Image (spheres, rainbow, N blue to C red):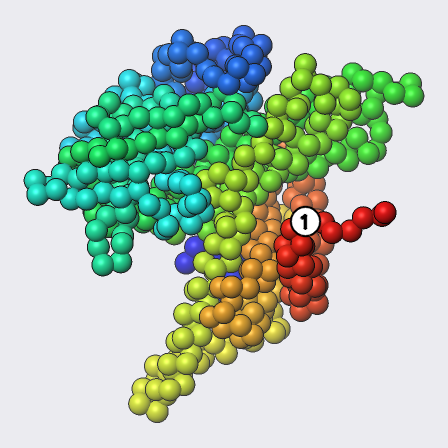
Amino acid sequence: MSAVKGLFSGRIAVESLMPYPRMLDKDRATLAMMVEAIDGFLTPQGADFKRWDRQGAQPPEFIQGLRDLGLFGLIIPEEFGGIGLSNAGYARILSQTSRHDSSVSLTIGAHSSIGMKGLLLFGTADQKARYLPRLASGEMIAAFCLTESGSGSDAASIRTHAERNPDGSWTLSGEKIWITNGGIADLYTVFARTPAADGKITAFIVEAAWPGVSHGRHEDKMGIRASSTTTVNFDQVRVPPGNVLDEAGKGFKVAMAILNNGRTGLGGGAVGGMKALLALATAQAKERHQFGHPIGEYDLIREKIAQMTLDCFAAESVVWMVAHYIDSGVEDYSTEAAISKVFASEAMQRTAYEALQIAGGSGFMRDHPYEQAVRDSRILTIFEGTNEVLRLYIALSGLKELGRSFGDLRAAIDDIFNHPIKGFGVLGDYAEKRLTQATGIGRDRISTQTPPALRAASEIYERYTLELAKACDFVLRRHGKAIADRQFELKRIADLAIDLFVGLCVLSRAAGLVDEPAKAAPAIAMANMFAEQAKRRMAGTIRRITRNEDEAVRALAAYVLEQGGYPWDVI
């Protein structure tokens, strides 16, 4: 069971959380050289990034510079001409590029995180030999084609379709929208509905140069404006039989695996953006004087800087924990990956907002970088799965495991006289779980494995892991299968899981820094701060499971929807 899914049943998988992972030795030397080269290439182009944002495009010579640095081959194995970084190393690179410009990270990330990730995960030996060397060099840039008009989060409702021809090839037709790298890509991973009794989806590798493939104009976006975003059209495109990813009809599985595996890139980018904003905010707080003092001496400014730092440390902690799971071969990490995306994206948005606030009126002006950071960060909670949908996924993934245990319990009661040993065994497991929830006896104790300075924080997570398990038990008994439609309850369950898992990652990281005196004290302080903040949030969330305004919210929204807007006025 995954670390997060264990929390839903009241278990803290200490072995999955501690000790906090360290960057692989093989990546360290490579990263040191690459970070220096990236800074050397991107730092002089700060004014260009601002101009390209306003123009809405990256020039070809800049894309060539990214090729020359090897940034399109970051996670492609060395045998195919790539650099072969781990997921953790890759996230660290995107963190560095994001300190300079979000559109740069998106061009690289859309290629590696999702565009050609299907080839790495599901490609045949022939497919990899044909495409990976050209993708590693940047001769081919990749894009991920899933979203359509009317089917954003509801990926199963796509209308692009492919028909199998007598010679085994496929004829593909349809339109994809909002495709990152759409206008510069040479290879697309395309998802289409294929003939089957249940209308299953298939993933295809499609080259941009094939007849019938075209793309629309560059979209005029709110943020990340310099990155290429277009529609991509497929008009009776013939796809060879050897360009199916995995198997026909397995495309939905392929798409979800790509998105889950690629989330560390987005998280790493968010962390880099937060670090850049913190550097700007601290400089502003020291240099700007009001009432005879630097504004950094005032508590309300220090509160913002402290919270921004805590958010960055927490986001970095959870993103690199998830990257470690992927690099270690953990099979079930999708819930953890979803949590890392939700937390990191929202933390980045808060940080951008507060950095602009610290800058005051200057932050609102386009001459300064803050307003672009706010615009660029706004997409993070929308793409690669909206945070609303991901919260539902987090909750339902954990509740699904518990639902199975309820099914086992019913089966044991029905069959207890025919198979008493098996039946009483299941009942015994259930009774132990209920006793643990009620009394805490038998619970997993992470507090015994953390330094004394983190003991109180550890005990908060132990207590609220049991509270999460009790809350899950309550909502499953109350709603049964109907829980899938109870989105308020699901959001609360997800928020509890997010606070617990992120907090445990922060705790683990702080515990791992105890032997480094220069870093230990502030890290321990942050871990305790996060635990106290999480405790207040979780306590409120637990209360709202049984005492809330859900029905009033539903009724008010229904009224406003019926009215078509806000119906009141003062005249």
* Image quadrant in which the N terminus is located: bottom left
Can residue 347 be seen at all in this image of the molecule? yes
Q: Nearer the viewer, residue 224 or 438?
A: 224
Q: Residue at x 70, y 41 (%)?
A: 525
> Of the residues shown, which amino acid type is indicated by label 1?
Gly
Q: Nearer the viewer, residue 446 or 515?
A: 446
Q: Position of residue 99 (x, y in %)?
A: 56, 22
Quadrant in the rendering for residue 409:
bottom left
Can residue 271 be seen at all in this image of the molecule? no
Label tally: 1
Q: Position of residue 527 (x, y in %)?
A: 65, 44
Q: Residue at x 32, y 19 (%)?
A: 138
Please determine whether, in this image, residue 471 is positioned above or below residue 318. Answer: below
* Residue that sits furthest to the front in the current view: 571
Q: Residue at x 67, y 63 (%)?
A: 555
Quadrant in the rendering for residue 186:
top left
Quadrant in the rendering for residue 536:
bottom right
Q: Is residue 59 left or right of residue 255?
A: right
* Residue that sits furthest to the bottom in the current view: 417
Q: Position of residue 207 (x, y in %)?
A: 24, 27
Q: Secondary structure at mark 1?
A: loop
Q: Nearer the viewer, residue 478 or 197?
A: 197
Q: Nearer the viewer, residue 431 or 69?
A: 69
Q: Residue at x 51, y 58 (%)?
A: 395
Give the crowd class for mark 1: few <14, some 14-19, many >=20 residues within 10 Å: few
Please determine whether, in this image, residue 437 is positioned above or below residue 74. Answer: below
**Which residue is labeled 1 in the image?**
565
